[in-house]
């Protein structure tokens, strides 16, 4: 039984002697290999973005999306295994509808995050199921608190964030996120920042071409889930791609960052 | 012998007629704002018109709780449509057909939704559905006792060049007649205008004017 977990990684019902649950860690690994996913809560809304990697050239643009509408006021971005993410989205939609049919009002994003976290957690408790290989970013508009961003991870934890990034380019992007001023950041400028962060986190020589997929729930979209207007995405992306190449240091840290183990301390977390 | 529920075939809180007419520039729906409890005028300021999405309005009579359920069902349909993001949108005709299936399915289970509906939408759509799932499209629609009292009046005055504002006046006239003769009708009414391009205008409840009761005195003298 040679291998990473030496027999302790076969199910989520077994702890390793060091107190780790390997299956859950493997699920987290699946997320880290995904295209970069970013969520930012701005003053006038919340922006979700995905670096949608396009290995297959025959795919039509806008197919295989990674950002989904859950309700009129909530959207989810998926990092990790797509089908697992879509399953979570399906669950989120039925939770949202169920809440509506009981209380006749929109589900608060906080409650949706809580319920999805509980749901994900259940899949780390039994030998006959595996954890979800995805982290989901829940962007929503709360009736009383305005825009908000929640993240649910494969282990079933859920946090409220100002900004979050995961996937291949996460380390470079998290560093860049830490430098933003969230008290003043608007959605439009966040879109431009995201385009820059994703561009700079990439290794042009090695990485597959990508589609920049973005959605927001903002004042501009009447507090409803909407795709960021194509023109804005295209112009933001063009702007950063035409910029003179960053200094060597910037580029090399970005490529060195890839595949590193995440340090959760770089997340910009909020009391929830 | 399978026992079937019978309580669903006895409506408790009910709305009365709904009227609709097609015009040159759109469709108009009208109904009063009453939900009766038996013969008691119990809820006098409720709305029986509902706009589930841009460019669609449904109006209904019959059991009010069933009507609310139908409104919820249509809301859910359009919310799912919103989440789909496939660039298609559900046409008023499709919704009309869908609701007819819902009502027919329920009557086939011997558990009907006790309503009659009018569906109006952009592209000059006007359709009608009853509690058995019978559905049709027509340039003039009236449900309940309105089908007997108002529909002949609408047909008499209907012409191909009818404008929406004239349509509103025509339906107001019919509501007036219904207020005189239908014991479950109310003076407070609402109208909805759906233009061909999909602009929807649902009025606030307002009182019918020009009511003429002299004839009632004549009836007393007999």
Image (tube, rainbow, N blue to C red):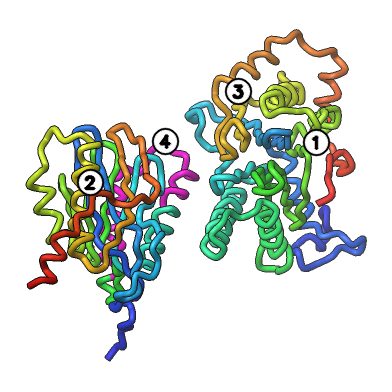
Q: Is residue B142 visible?
A: yes
Image side of residue B188 versus residue A42, left or right: left
Question: What residue is pinned by disc 1?
Answer: A259
Q: Are marks 1 and 2 in contact (CB under 8 Å)?
A: no
Q: Is residue B88 magenta?
A: yes
What is the C-alpha distance between the residues marked 3 and 4?
19 Å
Can you say which quadrant of the picture contains the N terminus of chain A?
Answer: bottom right
Q: What residue is shown at x 65% (from left), y 55% (from top)?
A: A112
Q: What residue is shown at x 36% (from left), y 63% (from top)?
A: B67
Question: What residue is pinned by disc 3?
Answer: A233
Closer to us: mark 4 or mark 2?
Answer: 2
Counting from the top left corner in percent of width and height, residue A219 is at 62, 33
Q: In this picture, which residue range is highlighted in magenta?
A: B77-106
What is the C-alpha distance between the residues marked 4 and 2?
24 Å
| Structural crowding at the residue carrying mark 1, measured as other residues with C-alpha within 10 Å and reported as few (<14), some (14–19) or many (≥20) | some
Q: Quadrant of residue A237?
A: top right
Q: Main secondary structure of the magenta part?
A: helix
The subunit carrying tag 2 is: B
Counting from the top left corner in percent of width and height, residue A196 is at 73, 21
Question: What residue is pinned by disc 2?
Answer: B126
The subunit carrying tag 1 is: A
* Residues behind callouts 4 and 2 on a single chain: yes
């Amino acid at each position: 039984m040679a291998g990473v977990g030496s027999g302790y990684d076969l199910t989520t019902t077994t702890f390793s002697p060091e107190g780790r649950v390997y299956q859950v860690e493997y699920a987290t690994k699946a997320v880290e290999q995904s295209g970069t996913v970013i969520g930012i809560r701005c003053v006038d809304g919340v922006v979700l973005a995905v670096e949608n990697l396009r290995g297959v050239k025959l795919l039509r643009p806008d197919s295989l999306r990674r950002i989904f509408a859950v309700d009129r006021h909530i959207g989810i971005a998926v990092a990790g295994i797509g089908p697992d993410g879509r399953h979570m989205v399906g669950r989120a939609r039925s939770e949202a509808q169920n809440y509506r049919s009981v209380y006749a009002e929109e589900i608060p994003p906080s409650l949706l995050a809580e319920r999805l976290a509980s749901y994900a957690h259940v899949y780390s408790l039994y030998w006959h199921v595996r954890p979800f290989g995805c982290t989901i970013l829940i962007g929503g508009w709360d009736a009383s608190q305005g825009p908000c961003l929640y993240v649910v991870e494969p282990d079933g934890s859920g946090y409220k964030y100002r900004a979050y990034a995961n996937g291949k380019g996460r380390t470079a992007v998290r560093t860049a996120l830490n430098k933003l001023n969230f008290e003043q950041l608007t959605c439009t400028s966040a879109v431009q920042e995201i385009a820059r962060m994703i561009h700079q986190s990439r290794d042009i020589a090695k990485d597959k071409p990508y589609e920049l997929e973005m959605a927001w729930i903002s004042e501009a979209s009447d507090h409803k889930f909407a795709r960021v207007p194509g023109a804005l995405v295209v112009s933001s992306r063009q702007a950063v791609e035409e910029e003179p190449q960053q200094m060597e240091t910037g580029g090399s840290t970005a490529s060195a960052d890839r595949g590193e183990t995440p340090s959760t301390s770089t997340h910009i977390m909020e009391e929830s | 012998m399978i026992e079937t529920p019978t309580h669903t075939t006895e409506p408790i809180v009910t709305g009365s007629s709904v009227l609709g007419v097609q015009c040159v520039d759109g469709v108009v729906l009208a109904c009063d704002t009453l939900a009766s409890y038996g013969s008691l005028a119990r809820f006098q300021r409720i709305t029986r018109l509902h706009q589930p999405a841009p460019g669609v309005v449904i109006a209904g009579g019959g059991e009010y709780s069933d009507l609310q359920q139908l409104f919820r069902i249509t809301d859910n349909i359009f919310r799912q449509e919103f989440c789909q993001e496939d660039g298609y949108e559900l046409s008023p005709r499709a919704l009309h057909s869908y609701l007819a299936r819902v009502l027919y399915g329920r009557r086939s289970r011997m558990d009907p939704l006790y309503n009659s509906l009018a569906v109006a939408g952009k592209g000059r759509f006007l359709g009608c559905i009853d509690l058995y799932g019978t559905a049709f499209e027509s340039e003039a629609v009236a449900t309940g006792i309105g089908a007997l009292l108002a529909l002949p009046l609408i047909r008499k005055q209907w012409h191909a060049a009818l404008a929406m504002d004239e349509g509103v006046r025509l339906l107001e006239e019919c509501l007036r007649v219904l207020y005189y003769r239908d014991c479950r009708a109310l003076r407070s009414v609402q109208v909805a205008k759906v233009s061909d391009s999909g602009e929807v205008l649902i009025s606030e409840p307002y009182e019918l004017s020009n009511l003429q009761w002299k004839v009632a005195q004549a009836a007393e003298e007999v």
